[in-house]
Amino acid sequence: MSRLLSRILLLAAGLGLSSCSGGSVVVRGEGLDVSALPADIRTDYGVFAQRCSKCHSLTRALNSGISDDHYWALYVERMRRQPASGITTDDVPVVLRFLHYYSVEVERARERAKTAGLPTRGDL
């Protein structure tokens, strides 16, 4: 088992939450281990983290269970309209790109756990 998958499964089992893979991405406190993100996603994550943490914890979005890009778009637009968010129209595609990446990786981790016979968030 890869180090990455081991970390993901440990996190998922320990927290009962989904996590993501693709370079040892591990949820830590209020966000992700940025050094484990692919280089092209780090900037997107930075915008997500800066904007979204103004109004709520990052884990609120990361553990939301949302996986549909259309729903993410509606959600981010609703958050953008909140006066304190600071999310600009230019930020929206950047945040959505990160959330799409994250959602895909969560699903991959879930499928790997299922294949390995481990409980996933829906099984707990």
Image (cartoon, rainbow, N blue to C red):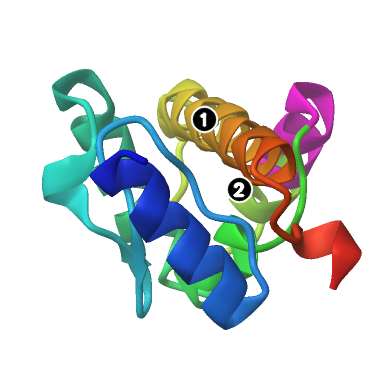
In the figure, is residue 68 to the left or right of 102?
A: right
Mark 1 lies on residue: 92
Regarding residue 120, the answer to whether it shows in the image is yes
Nearer-N-terminus badge (2/1)? 2
Q: Quadrant of residue 69?
A: top right
In the figure, is residue 40 to the left or right of 78?
A: left
Q: Is residue 27 above or below residue 16?
A: above
Q: At 58% across and 64% down in the image, what residue appears?
A: 83
Magenta-colored stretch includes residue 69:
yes
Q: Position of residue 82 (x, y in %)?
A: 64, 61
Q: Secondary structure at mark 1?
A: helix
Q: At 60% across and 48% down in the image, what residue appears?
A: 80
Q: Quadrant of residue 37?
A: top left
Q: Is residue 26 above or below residue 47?
A: below
**Residue toward you, 118 or 91:** 118
Region in magenta? 68-76
Instruction: Name the amino acid, label 2.
Output: Arg
Q: At 80% across and 29% down in the image, what residue appears?
A: 68
**Residue toward you, 67 or 71:** 67
Q: Is residue 91 above or below residue 114?
A: above
Quarter of the image where the C terminus is located:
bottom right
In the figure, is residue 80 to the left or right of 34?
A: right
Q: Position of residue 100 (x, y in %)?
A: 57, 27
Q: Position of residue 67 (x, y in %)?
A: 75, 36
Q: Secondary structure at mark 2?
A: helix
Query: Residue 80 shows which numbered tag?
Result: 2
User: How would you classify the magenta stretch by its main secondary structure?
Assistant: helix
Question: From mark 2 to mark 1, how far is it between C-alphas?
Answer: 8 Å
**Residue toward you, 115 or 110:** 115
**Cβ atoms at labels 2 and 1 below 8 Å apart:** yes
Instruction: Name the amino acid, label 1.
Output: Val
